[in-house]
Amino acid sequence: MRDIEHNKIKAVACYKLDRIGRKTADLMRLLEYLECHNVILLVCSNNINTQNNTSKIIIQVLAIIAEFERDILTEQIQDNLMELAKDGRWLGCNTPTGFISKRITTGSGKNKNAVSHLESIESEKRLVQKIYETFRSTRSIQTTAKIISRSYKTKQGADFNASTTRLILTNPIYCVADETAYRYFLEQGGNLFGEISEFGGKHGVSCYNKTDQSKIENEDSTFFNPKFSQTMIRKPIEKWIISVGAYEGFIPSDEWIETQTLLAAIAEKYNRPHRRTNALLAGIVYCPLCGRRLSVTSESDRWTHEKPRFKYTCPGIRKKECAFKAVDGVLLDGFVVAQLSNLSDESAAYYNTIFNEKLQNLISGDKTKAEYRETRKSKERTEAAIVAQMRNLREADEPLRKFI
């Protein structure tokens, strides 16, 4: 898309139309975008060329069919997840803390079938309960992680941090499936499978279709040494399929719901601008000396450029544990916004500085450096061969030159 805007591309070729888009509205917007930049769309399998007016009509018909296929596929996936929810079976990914996966095989021959279920681990069950109990008393994810790490480790043998602790606190698998849990997920708009009578308070809540996973190329990825990282985005509860699992629930539903309310309050507190001053960096800027999160201190009835004046101050100053000088909040917010704007300006000096730093880091990588050295040696060998051939051509007799 960026290359099209810079007029570097004359045509876009694809094998089938549904490889570009399965939603009619998106595809029409894309065609309009290509037409504005005088770019042709070529679809190989259907022999479509947008230079022809006939092809545009065919594209619209095929786009509707592609969208219909996508909707059918989505329905089939939803139906399959509903069937899985009947048994509360485990789909085979990494088991959460507190559980182990057990595979049960039934039948034989062509009728052989294998199903995975979760079973609780008593020691890890106590760990999960301790995490929930500690969080409800401290009301802090970071503090909870520090306390738990004194006595416990993760499944990988590492200390608990804010991320791993949050994953456990937000996982509905630990919630006891009872009437309270049923009504909570119903109010949140979740797709509940089964009647309220099935939520008897003995098992845990089983949720399907909770996340979207995708691959993102890493910054140090190269053509010869590609590197990708797996990202997981949590879907809203409205997209979940919720049922009663075939395993034990660890946390009473009222305690699990209370935990979700506390987590939502913490997220709201640190992910919004300061109410009185509209400080953009509230909750996300830290002291460079002691590492504490800087507080927003308002300067009453004082304004700069029609904005309320405030400062980012370190809480350690009052306790005389830090000597960090307060920062003018209006100036710092303005500076950060300006720097972020410069990141998209390819002609800016700051953009070029970051680009060159990343380039140097890429070249200095072990594998990339080895590739560079090997390529340089190959180039030197080729240049030496060229010089030798030129010398042979100069010194050879006339009959031999045409063969050289």
Image: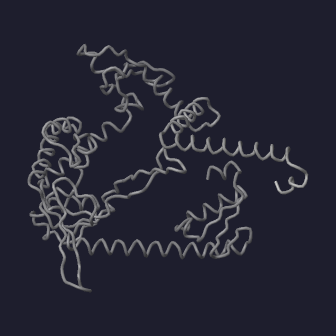
State which quarter of the image contains the C terminus.
bottom right
Which quadrant of the view contains residue 202?
Answer: bottom left
- Measuring 31% from the left and 25% from the top, which residue is drawn there? 291
- Measuring 64% from the left and 63% from the top, which residue is drawn there? 31
View extreme (bottom): residue: 110
- Using the image, determine if residue 288 lies above or below residue 71: above
- Using the image, determine if residue 80 lies above or below residue 183: below
Which quadrant of the view contains residue 29?
Answer: bottom right
Residue 249 rendering spot, x and y as whole percentages:
13, 59
Residue 163 rendering spot, x and y as whole percentages:
28, 43
View extreme (right): residue: 398
Task: Indicate the colouring scheme.
Answer: one colour
Residue 355 rendering spot, x and y as whole percentages:
57, 36
Say which of 41 and 387 sits in front: 387
Residue 162 rendering spot, x and y as whole percentages:
26, 40
- Measuring 35% from the left and 27% from the top, which residue is drawn there? 286
- Using the image, determine if residue 218 lies above or below residue 70: above
Which quadrant of the view contains residue 394?
Answer: top right
Say which of 137 and 117 sits in front: 117
Q: Is residue 289 left or right of residue 182?
A: right
Say which of 376 and 145 sits in front: 376
* Count of marks, rendered view: 0
Q: Is residue 176 left or right of residue 237?
A: left
